[in-house]
Image: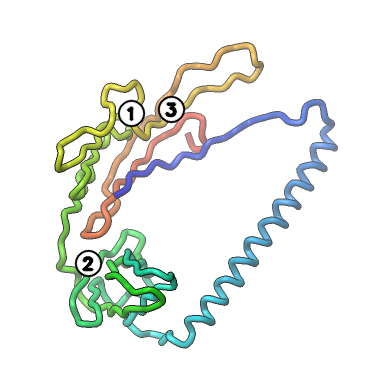
């Protein structure tokens, strides 16, 4: 389960000091050129990787098929969540394994379909089929207006601050965070900087205009989307 906050910080600095506008312009030009060259290496590596993956999977790929092969390329068994793009999972929201047994599946707000793969032996594969209908399997995952819970943890969001005000261990009913602390867990606090080096920094400023809504709710993933205005960041 996840609760997220998206803020973009803005850092201002004047460096190096005492340089002419022309020199600053030349440095920016070369900085952009160097950044572009570095980015090109990453883009080329990504392109080559995607081409190699496509070639490796070409022999087991059938266009338009609703059967998905989940391949474990590791040298040890593993299970986990499989995420399919919307275009590859438009046959339905229900997934069955090789024995036609239904497995937990969930359509995400992004349009992607996620399902739970059973343990796959090292360097082996299992196949799953996407079928029409919706998943009938339930779980202990819960998403409330300001809370998330599974069989181990229960999390509560403070609706006024958007921070985590409680995180408890379900079975022991034990609080895991200090609820009396000055700052809550995952809180946003902006401290205005000092530009001349003589004055002291200002007081901490919290986020404002908090909005919390349930983003994902299903048998595999529950999440809350928390948005706010964040002082000191773009879009504040």
Left or right: 212 in relation to 196: left
The image position of residue 72, as x and y in percent, is 40, 73
Q: Residue at x 43, y 86 (%)?
A: 60
- Report if the CB atoms under discs 1 and 3 are less than 8 Å apart: no
Colour mapping: rainbow
Left or right: 180 in relation to 29: left
Ranked by sequence position, the earlier of labels 1 and 2 is 2
Q: Which residue corresponds to mark 3?
A: 189
Secondary structure at numbered mark 3: strand
Q: Residue at x 26, y 34 (%)?
A: 176
Secondary structure at numbered mark 1: loop
Q: Which residue corresponds to mark 1?
A: 184
Occupied quadrant, residue 107: bottom left
The image position of residue 232, as x and y in percent, is 51, 30
Q: Which residue corresponds to mark 2?
A: 104
Secondary structure at numbered mark 2: loop
């Amino acid at each position: 389960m996840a609760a997220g906050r998206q803020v973009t910080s803005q850092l201002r600095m004047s460096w190096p000091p005492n340089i002419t506008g022309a020199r600053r312009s030349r440095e920016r030009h070369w900085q952009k050129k160097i950044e572009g060259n570095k980015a090109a290496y990453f883009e080329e590596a990504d392109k080559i990787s995607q081409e190699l993956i496509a070639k490796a999977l070409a022999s087991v790929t059938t266009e338009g098929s609703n059967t998905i092969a989940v391949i474990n390329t590791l040298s040890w068994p593993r299970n986990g969540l499989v995420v399919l793009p919307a275009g590859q999972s438009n046959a339905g929201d229900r997934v069955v394994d090789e024995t036609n047994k239904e497995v937990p599946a969930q359509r995400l707000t992004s349009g992607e379909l996620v399902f739970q793969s059973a343990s796959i032996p090292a360097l082996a594969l299992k196949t799953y089929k996407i079928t029409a209908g919706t998943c009938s399997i339930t779980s202990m995952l819960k998403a409330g207006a300001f809370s998330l819970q599974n069989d181990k943890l229960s999390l509560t969001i403070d609706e006024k601050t958007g921070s985590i005000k409680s995180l408890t261990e379900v079975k022991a009913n034990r609080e895991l965070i200090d609820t009396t602390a000055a700052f809550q867990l995952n809180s946003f606090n902006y401290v205005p900087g000092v530009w001349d080096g003589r004055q002291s920094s200002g007081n901490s400023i919290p986020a404002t205009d908090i909005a919390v809504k349930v983003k994902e709710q299903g048998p595999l993933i529950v999440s809350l989307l928390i948005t706010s205005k964040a002082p000191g960041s773009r879009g504040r």
